[in-house]
Image: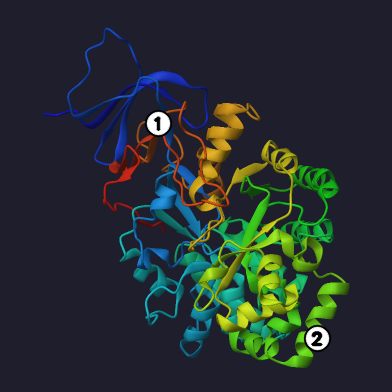
Amino acid sequence: MTAFDLLIRGATVYPGDAASFEGDVGVTNGAISLVTLWHKDSTPPDAREVVDGHGLMLCPGFIDLHTHSALRPFEDPLLTPKLAQGFTTEVINPDGLAPAPVAPERRAERQAYLRPLEGGGPETWPWSTVEEYLDALDATRPALSLVPSIGHGAVRELVLGGGRVEPTAANLRDMRREVRLGLEAGARMLSFGLVYLPGAYAATDELVAVAEEAAGFGVPLVPHVRNEGNGLLEAVGEMIDVARRSGAPLHVSHLKALADESLIEPLLALLESAATELDVTFDQYPYGAGSTLLASILPGWAQEGGAAGTLRTIGNRDDRRRIALEIANGLPGWENILGTLGPEQIEIANAAAPNEDAVGRTLAEIGTDRGSDPVATALDLMSESALDVTMVLHYASDAAVRAIARHPLQLVGSDGIFGSRPHPRLYATAPRFLGRFAIRDGLLPVEEAVARLTARAADRLGLSDRGRIAVGKRADLVLLDPARYIDTATYADPAQSPDGVAGVLVNGVTTLRNGVATGARPGGVVR
């Protein structure tokens, strides 16, 4: 009988939680069944397929802790931009945003709101509950494993609607019940989007109440904090307080300083101090630019009433004047992305008809061509494309990005958003962090970089079956050439997968060989 389905010989093995070594790794029935030191004179055991790993790195499959892939598998179950860089597991439904739970009468509105970030999914959503949504997602047979979060914003909208409403005690009980149902259905994080509606309406006590449900399941709170600009320290401090009061672990999404790089040092010190008493981590995409809805430049009041309300507001002459004044002058506690960064630093990543030609151009450039000021230009783009517009916003130096990347509490999340000209993080987060920052530049040891992409990320999710190369673990593996593995995607040409990925296995099945997807789809929803 053949001993192994696959045998990788002589690779430099990075186990995920220990020093590297030259070894042989065997796979049988989707699991790792052999890990041993390589000896040149040893006789290899029988295997259906033998791969020569000499000169290559063998790592556990990479885990992306922040993705916008909640609806993408309905269109592209291979998720090739993620697979081609070595990701085998993704966390979905970040930022408090999720396709479920959703009231049947609000499905179309939720779909319209999520479309720029997540895609539309099926033409008509057949689900209401989290469990129904996860069943539909699993039926797409994705190539990667998808780990769900339960979104606080989705829960709040289901219970309270989309308005600025303070929950009653009964409302809080209902919200807690929905969070609990999501966790029972398989969610491994409770995400918050405190800059997105309706999550932004929640007071701290509400966050604590729902966080207590997460604490009961031992899953982390994962917030997009209320302010990543000048109010950054206070916003992160709020979530530290929520974690302390609720007893839940805390994992801060896409850590950065949007307005002032001098905040990075005290920000990291704040998290270090909290980590002496709480379970605290954060994730980061390794770039000095972000990407989100163009509607995020609007003050909160202008986004009330969902997509329909926002479109009414930006079509009203008096409201447009008010928006322009507030962007020019700011509001207390408001992030004010456009006012802080300026129109030269904001470029369009994706835009629905009739504005496809705006993609890749800055608000300043588009405004000049249209003969209008940047605020009017942004409002017109959103109005004409029914809010289906995303942006890339440049805010930080490479030095600031690297200061966060080297910190020991850092883990990795791409925050990748699909689109016609996406942020390069969609295609190149892992090769930039591991290939450029660690292998090339020595910003951190290679073993450390691998650990953050694998074992520590799996531990953060409570996934004991993956993240390490050890006998009995799930055979999620990445075989790559360290001399070639580096990010090549740019802002001008982002759809570039890295070279040097010799193979990717998900659950023991080869899903990518020499940079080309095989078409195999052995992943699914992790519950």
Judged from the image, the secondary structure of the residue bearing numbered disc 2 is helix
**Horizontal arrangement in the rendering, residue 191 relative to residue 209 (left or right):** left
Q: Position of residue 194 (x, y in %)?
A: 70, 69
Judged from the image, the secondary structure of the residue bearing numbered disc 1 is loop
Nearest to viewer (mark 2 / mark 1): 2
* Label 2, residues with CA under 10 Å away: few <14, some 14-19, many ≥20: some
Determine which of the numbered discs, if any, sits on residue 470 in the image: 1
**Residue projecting furthest to the left:** 1
Q: Position of residue 20 (x, y in %)?
A: 48, 22
Residue 377, image quadrant: bottom right
**Horizontal arrangement in the rendering, residue 299 relative to residue 435 (left or right):** right
Which one is in front, 218 or 240? 240
Residue denoted by label 2: 321
Which color mode does the image show? rainbow
Kind of residue at badge 1: Ala
Question: Quadrant of the image for the C terminus?
Answer: bottom left
Kind of residue at badge 2: Arg
Q: Position of residue 407 (x, y in %)?
A: 70, 38
